[in-house]
Image (cartoon, rainbow, N blue to C red):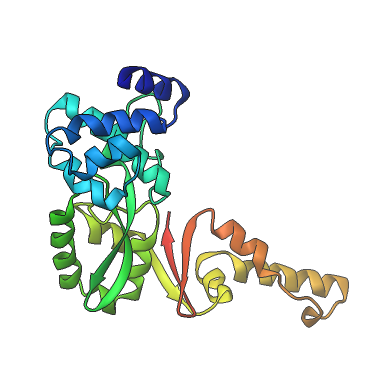
Amino acid sequence: MISDGIAQASAEHTEVDDYTARCIAHVPGRAYGRDSALAEFGRTGEGQYLTLRDEYLMLYTDAITKELIDWFGTYLVARENTGTGRQFMNEHLPPKLDLLLVRTRVRVGGQHFVVNIPASWDSGEIDGLIELLTELQLPEDQALQAFLSLPDVSVGSDNLMESFHEAFAGTFTSEEQVLRALSPLEDWETSLADWCIDQGLEYDALEWNYEPLMARLRDIYDVVEREEVLHVFVK
């Protein structure tokens, strides 16, 4: 039944269905007994990603078991709509938990932040992450907070700070300031002023519409607005 369910999901490039997920949960659930969260999910289909994750990751060892857990974990994250989906995966291959990012709320320095962690991480690795983010002084660095909130940024990256500094284009107080720094806005203003002179128009009679200009800029940059400022990163 599991093989048939996985074959169907592979052919349709989707996650396994509810019934197949319950069958998969039943297999690792046998390692813990009937009182485990996995066994309960196998019987009823009830259970949450956070309550099931550490149980199945403890068994994330040999290739066959890993593949089953990859399908099951990806199913759970998709069901709760807390992940990045398969954007980092080959759609023709089985899913891999280390290629799936999950939005996760962590507490650092008395404050809560949302970051994206690999779905292959358990609670112990998250505890280590909190230590790292404390060392990086995350509560004091609003630009880093904005960077880590981007859906394609993994907080588990080995070169996290290097990636942050390479991508960070600046913090700005308005869309106009962003456009002046990162687009040819001033050149366009000069060209428009020349056109106004040729047409005998007062330059002040025209008003810029920044919305379409920002839409074009967002094709190149990620813009995160927080506390009335704009943090901008190269995509």
Residue at figure coordinates x 56%, y 69% from the top left: 179
Single out the residue that lies furthest toward the right.
200
The picture places residue 112, in percent across and down from the top left corner, at 30, 72
Judge from the rendering whether residue 61 lies leftward or rightward of residue 165; answer left or right: left
| Of the pair 55 and 213, the residue shown nearer to us | 55
Residue 163 in sight in this render: yes
Q: Answer with the quarter of the image where residue 77 lies.
A: top left
Is 115 left or right of 203, judged from the image as shown? left
Measured from the top left, where is residue 135 in percent x and y? 15, 71
At a point 12% along the width and 33% down the height, the residue shown is 61
Residue 101: x %, y % from top left: 32, 48
User: Which quadrant: the N terminus?
Assistant: top left
Q: Is residue 7 above or below residue 137?
A: above
Counting labels gives 0
Looking at the image, residue 141 lies above or below residue 70: below
Q: Is residue 95 visible?
A: no
The residue positioned 41% from the left and 40% from the top of the image is: 87
Q: Which of 115 and 8 lies nearest the eye of the viewer?
A: 8
**Residue 133 drawn above or below residue 234:** below
User: Could you tell whether 224 is left or right of 192 in the image?
Assistant: left
Point 44% across, 30% down: residue: 14
Q: Position of residue 147 (x, y in %)?
A: 36, 63
Q: Does residue 132 lie above or below 30 as drawn?
A: below
State the image quarter where residue 199 is shown. Answer: bottom right
